Structures are given as C-alpha cells and as structure tokens.
Image (spheres, grey):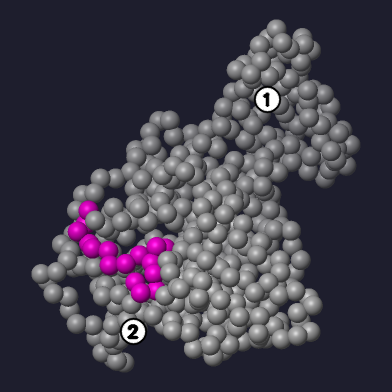
Amino acid sequence: MELTLWTYEGPPHVGAMRVANSMRDLHFVLHAPQGDTYADLLFTMIERNEKRPPVTYTTFQARDLGADTADIFKSACQESYERFRPQALLVGASCTAELIQDDPKGMAKALNLPVPVIGVELLAYQRKENWGAAETFYQLVRTLAGGERLAPGQKRPPRDPARAARCNILGPTSLGFRNRDDLTEVLSLLEMMGVEVNLVAPLGASPSDLQRLGEADFNVVLYPEVAGLAANWLERSYGQPMTKTVPIGVGATHDFLAEVAELAGLDGVPDLGGSRLPWYSRSVDSTYLTGKRVFIFADATHAIAAARIAKEEMGFEVVGLGSYSREQARDVRAAAQALGLEALITDDYLEVEEAVAELRPELLLGSQMERHIAKRLGIGCAVISSPVHVQDFPARYSPQAGFEGANVIFDSWVHPLMMGLEEHLLGMFREDFEFADGAAPSHLASEASRKPEEAHGNKQNTPAEGPAWAGEAERELGKIPFFVRGKARRNTERFAAERGLDLITLETLYDAKAHFSR
C-alpha cells in the first residue's frame, strides 16, 4: 500500500455505491467502520444529489471489535429490509471491514430474507473503484437477469423482421463523467435510427428491470469500465452481441451508428445531421490551432476517444497518452502505439506531472488532477474524465457523446488555447495603463479609484530558484506569448545552468533561443 495525497480512483466499495445509487428499489448494506460514511459526500456534494445514497453502514467502532461484529451486520441487514422494502439487497464490506473477514454474503443469506441477496467480494487491497462498479453490476446482472439462457454452442434465434430491433444501453452510472447527458444524446440517436431501447442499466433501472435484459437483440456498451464485464457475460449467456465503439467524437459517432445499423439489421445509416466541429476545425479561425501539442491522461474510454479526436478531427499533435485504468491498459497501449507513443499507465499523479513537465505540451486533457498539474505548469487544460469536481457536473446540457457532444468537446478544448492567445494580446499592451499588471478590471473599478502607481505598475515575476534574471532579459521574456513563455523560461534557465551561468542576460536569452531552435 502506498500513501498518497490524491487518488484517481476510490476503493472498490465506492464503485459499488455508484451502482447502488444509480438504481431504484435496491439497497446496499455496507459492513464498514465509523468514518467510512464519508463516501456519501461524493454524491450529495460533488454530484449534488437531492438525497443520500441508498446505503446502510454498520458503522462499528473500535470497542465493537472485542465483541461480535457479525451480529451488528445481521441486524443492519434485517432493519434495512424492514425499513426500505427493496426488491433486492446488495451486501459487501469496505476496505477496513474486509480485514475482520465477517463474510457479509453468507451472513445475509442466513437471514432468509424474502428478496434476492447479492453479495460482492470487493478485494479492496487489490482493486479500485471502477473495478468495484463493474464487479457489482456484473453480479447484479448474473443474479437477476431473467429469460431462458442459451446452452453451450446454442445460437440465439433470429429476430422477427416484423419487429423493430431492440437494444440495452449499459454502463451509465451515478458519479460518471457526463453520463446523464451522454445517455440523452445516445437515446436520441437510437430513436432517429428506429432502434427501440429495451432497458438502460444501471442508471434508472430496478432489480426487476434487469430480468428483461435478455429481451434485447444487442447491447450498447457506453462505458466499458463499468459495463464490459456484464456485457461479455450477456453475450455468452443470451447471444447478445455488443457495440465496440464509444460514440465520443464525430468519427467515432459515425462508426457507432454504422455498428448499430449492422447489429440492428438496418440498410445503411440514415442522415442524422452532424456536428459543427468539422467545420470549425477547417475554418480560418482554427488554423492557428493546427499542430498544437497535447497530452492526454484519463480513464481508458475518454483517453482513447480524446486521442482520436485530437489527431483526426482537431489536427493536434498527441505527444503523450495514458490512463489510470489498469483493467483497460491493453486498449490504451494499442491506441498509443498507433500514434507512435508509449502509453503511461499509472495511478501516481506525480508520475503524470513529471511526464507533462518533460514533454511541455500546450494543452493538457485529463481529470481534475491534471487541472491542478496544468495550473502549476502554466498549461491550458480541459477536463475530459473522472475524477472530477462539482463544477464538472453542470446544470446545463453538456454531453461528450454524439454530435452535440463533439460540439461541447470542441468548445472546451479550444477555449483554453483561445484564452492563451487573449493573454498574449494583453501582454503586448502591458505598457498601456489599462492593461498594466496592477490595473484592476475595468468593470470592477474606475481609473479614479486607483492610485497612479497601481494603474501604471508593471510588476515583474522573478524565479524562486536557479540562475538570476537581468531586468532587460526578464522584460524581453515578457514579450513571448503567454502559452509558451513558461517553456522559454525553463529552456533558458537550463541552458544557463548547463554553462555555469549565474545571471541570465539578454544575450543569454538569445543564445538559448538559437540553441533550442536548431
């Protein structure tokens, strides 16, 4: 176990909670010590849910360890059933409770409750949050899916051509990155194609709904991190094929629609409109973005999608690609290899920061962790994946999937670069009293309310360590565009350090520029 300040994923019981919180009429009894209830805040504070998750904690304390914690768990199960009357009861243990080995599943089964009891072994010291969500959903599907399963070697009977094709949409969960809006977009695309949606799960489904999973002709897998395990089992048990493409980006959305058309037995893909992203990408206003260096680090689904969009649809140069999703590491490595890169697979944010600092990209696409990294390094950033902050659960419609999602992606990626250009223009006029560093925003304070030295000040930033900068060199550095100034400073300081120079003069700055331009 490694002590760290930040983590990309929580423990597996948080993943199980995400699935439980997504569904209706399902209750989760979590064997956990007092203090593990912190996870409720992820849903009430970060996702801004109006009610707390459907989870009962045993909340045993240190003094309880000398007695029988099993009795505490069994009482919690019985009381939860009597109070909430769920259609099914999910039981498991948190990472701390796993150490006392109380066997939640066996204890709950012994109560003979009149509802299905699904136990999940969450392997807290080997696995993490997304695996916990996938394992929980898989156990629910395997236990509750109804209908007749196929015998080994048996094939699914063909669909009646008089009936429209039906699909399940699998993967959207509570706390998922833009899952709510992605689902709306995908539902709209499927409706326009004439494909019926049999069931969406786990988001919005009940345990009784899962009994209808076998009625669909195929499955749409939106988030393989959560739904891949269950979808593979449904393919083996019910003969339901599944989509392989996640519709994030214009090209991926077209590929997804073609895949759905093939699985649904449709004659081609109807014209469903499109995104404004391709037009923007070809426009004069966007030509200065071509070739921008971008580093991508996210969950596997969004990292792979972002790499394709960056290279094929935005004209960026992908200089780094990685993910913390170890279960999907093979797919990320394949995507990186296609770009001539070696994938960075890690859950250590310090390794990510080191790689970003070394590669010096102009745009960083990642999670809220990468947002902090980008801020420290002075790089533009857009959040494309969990883990996220409350601001990444907007009240507005803001999908990532489908054609409208491509519009949202274009805006969120381009705006940090556009703001970099704006900062550069402000820097060009920094000697003007209106744009001096000490000047307050024009809409917040009038010229009369400021002191002359504040209005005309031009405070220079000095490095905290390394070679000192002469005043004329520092002023010349300030003329370099905002979004590459940090790189120019680092290169010059490295150039000076390698030559044993204690003071960076104007001549040193020019020499460094000539050296790194070769």
According to the image, label 1 marks what residue? 479
Element type at marker 2? Answer: helix
**Residue at x-position 63% and y-position 41%:** 379
Looking at the image, which is closer to me, 473 or 131?
131
Looking at the image, which is closer to me, 191 or 486?
191
* Quarter location, residue 430: top right
Position of 457 relative to 394 (above/below): above
Res 428 visible: no
Specify whether 333 is left or right of 264: right
Specify whether 465 is left or right of 258: right
Looking at the image, which is closer to me, 497 or 294?
294
Q: Identity of the amino acid at label 1?
A: Lys
According to the image, label 2 marks what residue? 237
**Residue at x-position 72% and y-position 28%:** 477
**Residue at x-position 39% and y-position 69%:** 206
Pointer 2: residues within 10 angstroms few (<14), some, or many (20+)?
Answer: some
Q: Identity of the amino acid at label 2?
A: Ser
Specify whether 413 is left or right of 65: left
Is 198 colored magenta in this rendering? yes
Is 133 colored magenta in this rendering? no
